[in-house]
Amino acid sequence: MTKIFGHRGSKGKYPENTLRSFQAALEEGADGLELDVHLTKDGEVIVIHDEALDRTTDGHGQIKDLTLEEIKQYSAGKRFPHFNKYDTTWDKERVPTLAEVLQLLSGTDIALNIELKTYIYTYPGIEEKLFSVVNEYGENRKIVYSSFHLPSLIRMKGIDPDADIALLLFSPISNPQDYIQTFDFESLHVAKDLLLQDTHKLFQDLYTKTRVWTVNDEEEILQLLKMGVNTIITDYPEKAVKLKKQN
Ligand code: G3P
Ligand code: CA
């Protein structure tokens, strides 16, 4: 049965990649969470989408040039754009470490998709560090590592041969099955238009191994539920969970 993952938590309603957003996705009944990781100057794995603080926090600068302590000074909630629904408690949100997110999830069986944002900066050592954080705090959680950067995924597989790995794709490739077989990956994470247009034929034998992002439109969610894809990754987990229950 198709699973629903909350993209950066419950990004449509809460400041993305914050503990508040992850808590909301949990409460909304998501089967899993998606988040993005970078490495700080002092080697901490933190959860933020961009290479820099500027878009989602009130701080400035590249993650790789800042320590965790410096990053923690800034609010990760203040810049959330839904000002009409703004909740001032969000100001207190900080950029979380991956360890803090895993601690928040402790005792639940929610799955976690960790996207390595390694295509602009490669962050030497991020894969080893990630493995050690997940080892310490991951419990028996289902973890899927994904990235657009193939070398990062190959490194992850080398460090942990049992890891579930997914290549992110935003443009068509002629034989997607090759990527799974050649690198012993578990699945593909595919931009929604590749499955909602003619290119879906490339993936038709792989729907049960395909997670699709980022699907927010009701009709599109219904279409993908009907196709039986492995997972729908959405900014609105509450809506997708409801649609899944009704269909
Ligand atoms: O994991 C799917 C999706 O999150 C990739 O794109 O830019 O939202 O990280 P982006
Ligand atoms: Ca992502």
Image: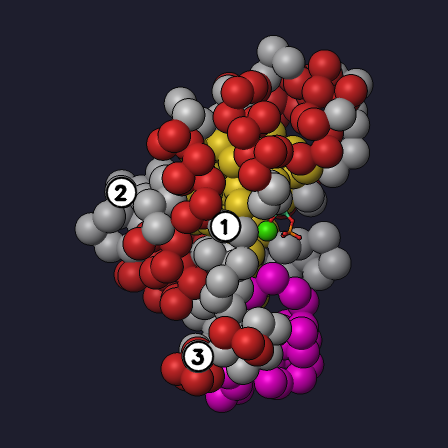
Residue at the image position 51 percent from the left and 69 percent from the top:
15
For mark 3, give the secondary structure: loop
> Mark 3 — residue?
87
Relative depth, front residue between 124 and 225? 225
Left or right of residue 100: residue 72: right
Q: Is tag 3's residue or tag 1's residue first in the polypeptide sequence?
A: 3
Query: Which stretch is magenta?
Result: 46-75
Image coords of residue 238 (percent x, y) = 41, 48
Badge 1 amino acid:
Tyr
Badge 3 amino acid:
Asp
Relative depth, front residue between 101 and 3? 3
Query: Is residue 138 at least partly visible in the picture?
Result: yes
As measured in the structure, the alpha-carbon distance from the residue carrying label 3 to the one carrying label 1 is: 18 Å
As measured in the structure, the alpha-carbon distance from the residue carrying label 3 to the one carrying label 2 is: 29 Å
Residue at the image position 67 percent from the left and 67 percent from the top:
51
Relative depth, front residue between 228 and 33? 228
The answer to whether mark 1 and mark 2 are in CB contact below 8 A is no
* Dot 3 crowding, Cα within 10 Å, few <14, some 14–19, many 20+: few
> Mark 1 — residue?
236
User: Would you say residue 74 sits in the magenta stretch?
Assistant: yes
The answer to whether mark 3 and mark 1 are in CB contact below 8 A is no
Badge 2 amino acid:
Asp
Image coords of residue 245 (percent x, y) = 36, 32
As measured in the structure, the alpha-carbon distance from the residue carrying label 1 to the one carrying label 2 is: 20 Å
The answer to which quarter of the image holds residue 180 is top right
Residue at the image position 58 percent from the left and 26 percent from the top:
223
